[in-house]
Image (cartoon, rainbow, N blue to C red):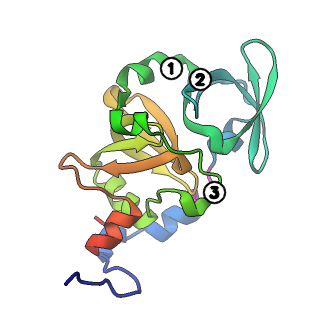
Amino acid sequence: MEKRLEKGPLPADKDALAGLDDYLRAHQKDSIFAQEAGRGTSWCLFLHGNERKVGKIQSDQTYEIDLLTQEGVVEKIHKVKVKILCEASREQEVVALLKTDETLKAAPEGPHFGPRYRHHIKNKTLYPLMNRREVLFFTMLEGELLRGIVAGFSRFEISLHMKGGVPAVLLRHAVFDVRDKKGQSYSKEAVEKRGKYW
């Protein structure tokens, strides 16, 4: 007979989560879109549909951004359509480091506008992994696979340092799964199934 998990909080290692509340107070509302709006830095946006756009973030609204493209056109882009961002000067480095999950690429997901359809990763899971500098493998909804160390996270984003320190920002709504070197998943579903955050 399959053992059913009881409702309620999962057991947590207090040492591993020490400082999480302070971290969230300081960073939960961080947004790369708000930070970069109007600054003039060129960014490469990896969008659903395997499309890339390069431009400067002109303004940040609740659900959309205005991107001034290289062609001088201002495009309104829904944030849910953005999967990954990096500075335009690092685009080729990020592309060179991207791998592909062929199974997911063949049957891609998203974009998921409704939070109930997303693949959540809990803050209580990310925080110890970040502090331990654990090497992780993030799979995105259309099969992109990024390997790196979590450098920070907020409600909407995960900052990743890839091989050689190459930085990229992952949008949490576009993450399909995250696993360690042993293949253990840290998605909310997997964590709740095994009854521990890590």
Using the rendered image of the protein, determine whether residue 161 is visible from the camera's viewpoint.
Answer: no
Query: Do the numbered discs 2 and 1 sit on residues whose CB atoms are within 8 Å?
Result: yes
Point 42% across, 34% down: residue: 105
Q: CA distance from mark 2 to mark 1?
A: 10 Å
Q: Let me know if residue 13 is in the magenta part.
A: no
Magenta residues, start to end: 26-30
Query: Which one is closest to the eye, mark 2 or mark 3?
Result: 2
Q: Quadrant of residue 97?
A: top left
Q: Nearer the viewer, residue 97 or 177?
A: 177
User: Mark number for residue 167?
Assistant: none
In the drawing, does residue 34 fall left or right of residue 5? right
User: Mark number for residue 29?
Assistant: 3
- The kind of residue on which mark 2 rests is Arg
On screen, 50 above or below 12?
A: above
On screen, 179 above or below 60?
A: below
On screen, 64 above or below 47?
A: below
